[in-house]
Image: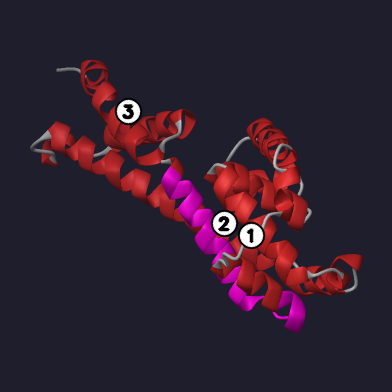
């Protein structure tokens, strides 16, 4: 069997594996192509089972890609100037209202009315003033898609404005850590909760 025939035979299988792991067509295609390129450069006389070799290779390449994305997102969060954000928030008029009550209501709506990715995009843009390029870096989603998610989220929230005055007593870990960050000016716990929220959103989407 020629190299071209081997690629034609196993490409659908490798692509299916990559899509299942990455949930992104473009990334899956890149990983499959990378896998075949490395296979072409390998010592074929040492490969006893070509299919098993390619399946193992594409799986490892996908896992390495996901790990790299995770590290990139963590580094981006760590690079954000949290002290400046906390100080800016503490100096704003927002702190003069009933903070705990308002935040509880706001987070209730965010968590119950928005899809995970909608919530992530909306919070990053509205609460932290991230631009779409930054959100793209953090969530690994195209800017146009992020804009659509934000518009969809804002539309849903606009429909919920009248319900924000309802009595809501639920307190989430994210809301609690955000309030504490604003009170004490220290964002370590909130950063951890934000990471958990984003990770959970991405997992639910997949």
The reply to whether callout 3 and callout 1 are in contact (CB within 8 Å) is no
Tag of residue 73: 2
Q: Residue at x 72, y 39 (%)?
A: 154
Q: Quadrant of the C terminus?
A: top left
Magenta stretch, residue numbers? 181-204
Q: Single out the residue that lies furthest toward the front.
A: 167
The residue positioned 78% from the left and 72% from the top of the image is 86
The crowd level at tag 3 (other Cα within 10 Å; few <14, some 14-19, many 20+) is: many
Q: Residue furthest left?
A: 48
Query: Up-down: is 102 above or below 187?
Result: above
What residue is pinned by disc 3?
15
| Figure quadrant of residue 2 | top left
- Percent coordinates x, y for residue 6 in the rendering: 21, 21
Disc 1 vs disc 2: Cβ atoms closer than 8 Å?
A: yes
Question: Mark 3 or mark 2: which comes first in sequence?
Answer: 3
Q: What residue sits 28% from the left and 43% below the top?
A: 59
Tell me, yes or no, if residue 140 can be seen here.
Answer: no
- Residue 114, image x, y percentages: 59, 43
Q: Is residue 133 magenta?
A: no
Residue assigned mark 1: 76
Q: Disc 3 to disc 1, how far (Cα)?
A: 29 Å
Secondary structure under the numbered disc 3 in the rendered image: helix
Image position of 131 (left or right of 36):
right
Q: Quadrant of residue 54?
A: top left
Q: Is residue 185 magenta?
A: yes
Disc 2 is placed on an element classified as helix
In the rendered view, tell whether residue 39 sits above or below residue 78.
Answer: above
- Res 73 quadrant in image: bottom right
Picture coordinates of residue 1 (x, y %)? 14, 17
Q: Nearer the viewer, residue 32 or 202?
A: 202
- Mark 1 closeness class: few <14, some 14–19, many ≥20 residues within 10 Å: some
């Amino acid at each position: 069997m020629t190299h071209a025939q081997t690629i034609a035979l196993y490409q659908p299988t490798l692509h299916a594996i990559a899509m299942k792991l990455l949930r992104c067509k473009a990334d899956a295609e890149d990983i499959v192509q990378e896998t075949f390129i490395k296979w072409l450069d390998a010592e074929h006389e040492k490969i006893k089972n070509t299919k098993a070799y390619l399946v193992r290779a594409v799986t490892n390449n996908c896992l390495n890609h996901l790990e790299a994305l995770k590290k990139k997102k963590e580094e981006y969060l760590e690079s954000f100037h949290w002290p400046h954000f906390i100080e800016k928030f503490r100096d704003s008029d927002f702190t003069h209202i009933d903070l705990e009550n308002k935040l509880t209501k706001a987070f209730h709506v965010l968590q119950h009315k928005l899809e995970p990715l909608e919530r992530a995009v909306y919070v990053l843009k509205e609460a932290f003033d991230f631009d779409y390029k930054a959100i793209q870096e953090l969530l690994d989603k195209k800017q146009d898609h992020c804009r659509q998610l934000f518009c969809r989220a804002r539309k849903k929230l606009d429909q919920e404005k009248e319900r924000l005055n309802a009595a809501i007593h639920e307190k989430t870990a994210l809301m609690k850590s955000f309030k504490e960050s604003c009170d004490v000016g220290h964002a370590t716990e909130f950063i951890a909760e934000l990471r958990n929220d984003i990770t959970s959103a991405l997992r639910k989407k997949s």
